[in-house]
Each structure stands twice: as structure tokens, then as C-alpha cells.
Amino acid sequence: MSDICQLSKSSWSWDLPVHTSIISEWGLECASSLVKGLPASSFFMGCLAGGFVLATLADSSLGRKNMLFLTCLMMSLSSLLTILSTNVWIYSALRFVNGFGRATIGTCAIVLSTELVGKKWRGQVGTLGFLCFTLGFLSLPAIAYINRGSSWRALYFWTSTPTILYSMLVPFLVRESPRWLFVQGRTDEAVSIIKSITPTSNRNNISTMSFSNLCFERETWNVDLYSAIKVLVETKWAFRRISAAMVTGFGIGMVYYGMPLGLGNLSFNLYLSVTLNALSELPTSIITFFLIGKLNRRSSLLGFTILSGTCSVMCVVAGNVSATLQIGLELVSFFSACTAFGLTLIYTLELFPTCVRNSAISMVRQAVVFGGVFSPMLVAAGRKNGFLLFGIFGLVIGVCGLFVVVLPETRDRTLSDTMDEEEYKERVACNTIS
């Protein structure tokens, strides 16, 4: 009999110590799928809630630096406190808080870092964030291997403690975005930060008067949680851009999160295919770093989504020809989706002005995550029909990628700070075309 739930407790035992996982420690082996999946679901629900609630605060009242510090601290402390969980309900609640804090860390980091540099280095600096994320992700198997056989609480300790130290360094080593400060009317603070990051020989040439002729207008409407989202929806050009970016992000998210889940449906060796997919994200970041300055955003994003979609659809046919060819097409599709993911975020931050930039990127990231929500269902359906997995993946990312054609090109373009400034550029572009 393979179902241990129909056996007495005394007739079987765990291979590893009971404290190795929450399933064994809290006796959840016979619990419902809802209970066992609750911690993971709580984390993703926290990500969705945090992305909605916290995103606009970085544009309105708190700013990029404070939001980065608070969310990083919230994520790391809730992760550390998870060690004290005594049951699955407390554990799930802390996972929700963990996801809530984690939701906007990546967004704040990429927005803040790109707003601190000029357009020459904007793409490269934005790509560095993806590279660091990949390196951090690759460190997890090493941590897990070192702690194999140890309590699950040890894993939380070793992954949360460094993050607490990182968050404590933010107030001392990170500078607030001068662009955001200018938009908020805090000119003296902005000038002070610009001086601090300027070579010593040029600092004496910078003063508040140096910026007196620039049109930095405070966006007085951006004062509460929903202001940024409201203006993105009500402004015609902004609504067109955010809608197209979110639809594209949805398609990319379905493939980005779904491809690794669907590897078990391929004819190739599962362990090797998982390893190849994990390793493919590292060269993606490196290649994008060196090429981002030369790539047109719109055409590149369109090309990568179409390439990903085409290779994904071809995986269905290739499975009957060669397992090696199938995994090769899958890797190209996943590689293209990863590259498109990074390009989408960089493209989005260039499409919107400082006053709503953080909110816009958060909405696109939410669309990416939302696309990933449908992936497990397609993976389950794809076990009987390959087209319902890789075929649907390919069609969705290919069709969604077509929406970028309505967006303007932003490569080498100066970032705008206010809605009026961006709207003026939109009108000039339209008049030029007509």
C-alpha cells in the first residue's frame, strides 16, 4: 500500500529527521492540498497585495530610498521571525507578510539605480539588478546543500540574516533619487545629493542656482495611494502605454514562470533540463548588459517575444523528432522570454515620468506575476496534450508581444520627470510623424 495516510503512524517513519520540513514536523503529510499549499499561496497573495499597496507610496510620500529600506527590512524580519512558527497558520501568515514586503524591492531598486545615472548607463545599470538577482537565486542551492539534513528553520536563518544586514546599510550607503526630490519640490536636498555623487573637482560648480532655469514642477496631485494609478488610467497616452506594457508582461510571465514548471513534460532528462534552464538566466543577464546600449527597445522586445513564441510552438512538433532538438528549442524560448522580461522593465521605466515611474513598473511586474498564475494549470493540461502547454505558451507570448508596436521608441531618450513634460514629448512626436 503506497498511501501512508491509510497506515498507522507506528508502521512507517521519515527517512530524514522530522524537523527537516514543515510537512514532517507538523504532521501535514495527510493534510489537504489546500493546507499544504497555503504557505506558497500566502506568499504570492502577499506579493500581489504589496505590489498594489506599496508601489505608489514610492512615487508620492516615502520616496525610493525609504521604500527600499522599509520593504527590505519587512521582508528580512518576517523571514527571520518565521523560525518561531509553531504551526502552519502562523507560518502562512508570516509568509504573507514576507511576500508583502518583497513585492516592491526589485521595483524600487531598479528605479532608484537608473534615476541616479545618465542615459548612457541607464540600460547597463538596470541590467545589473537582474544579474545580481540571478546570482542570489543560484546561491540558494548551495545554502540548501550545506544545510542538508538540518532543520528548515536553519535555511530561514541563513537566508534572512544577510538580508537584514543589507537593509541596515541602505540608509548609509544609498542616495535618494534627485529626480524624485526635484519633483517633490525638495531642490536643496536634490542638489546636495548630486554634489555627493559628483567628482570632487566639479562640485564647486553645482549649486541650487544651477537648476533655477530648469522646469522642475512639483506634481501636487500625487499625494495618496491611488493618485498615480488614477492618473495612469485617466491620461490617454499613459493608459495606452501601461495597457500595452501590461499585456506584453502577461505573455512574458506565462512563459517565464511556466517553462521551468513544464520541463517534466519534455522527452529530455528532467534533472539535466532543470539545470540547463537555471544556468540560462546567467548568460541572459550578461549578454543583455553588453547589448542593452545598442538595442532598440521596441523592435528588440518584439523580436524576442516572437522568437520565444515560435520556438515554444515548435517544441510540440520537435518532441516527435528528437529530444535533443526539443530541449534546444525550449532553451531558446526560455532564454528569449528571460531577455524580454528584463527589456520590458527597462522599457517601462523609460516610458513613464519620474512622478509615476515606480507605480508603472509595479503594475507591469504584477501583470508578469499574473501571467505566471495560469502556468500550473497549463502544465497539468499539457501532460496529456503537449499543445495545451508549449503551444499555448507560444501563442500567448507571441500575440501579447505584438502590443509593443503601439509604444514609442525610448532608446537614448532623456527621462521625463512630470506628466506634462512627457505629454509634451508625446505631442511633438505625433506632430513629427503627421
Image (cartoon, helix red, strand yellow):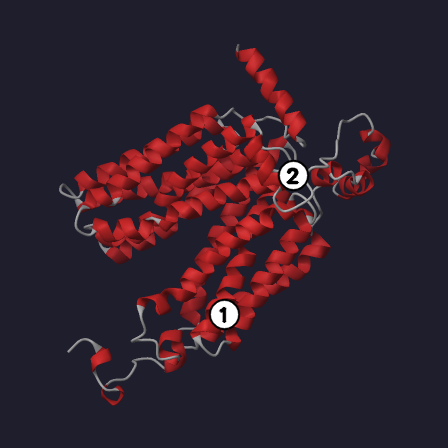
Q: Is residue 384 left or right of residue 143?
A: left
Q: In this view, does 171 lie above or below 1?
A: above
**Secondary structure beneath label 2:** helix
Query: Picture coordinates of residue 252 (x, y %)?
Result: 39, 40
Categorize mark 2 by other alpha carbons within 10 Å: few (<14), some (14-19), many (20+).
Answer: many
The image quarter containing residue 319 is top left
Residue identified by numbered label 2: 115
* In the image, residue 147 above or below residue 312: below
Gap between marks 2 and 1, in whole Å? 33 Å
Q: Which amino acid does label 1 sit on?
A: Tyr
Horizontal side, residue 205 vs residue 365: left or right: right
Whole-percent x and y of residue 82?
51, 71
The quarter of the picture where the N terminus appears is: bottom left
Residue at point 57%, 34% (across, down):
232
Q: Name the residue under label 1.
A: 156
**Could you say where residue 276 lies in the image, as x and y percent from the top left?**
32, 51
Residue 103 seen in render: no
Residue at 49% across, 55% down: 47
Q: How many labels does the image show?
A: 2
What is the residue that sits farthest to the top in this orientation? 434
State the image coordinates of residue 298 (x, y, percent, origin top left). 46, 27
Residue 288 higher or lower than 215, as above or below: below
Disc 1 packing (10 Å; few <14; some 14–19; many ≥20)? some
Identified by mark 2, the residue type is: Glu
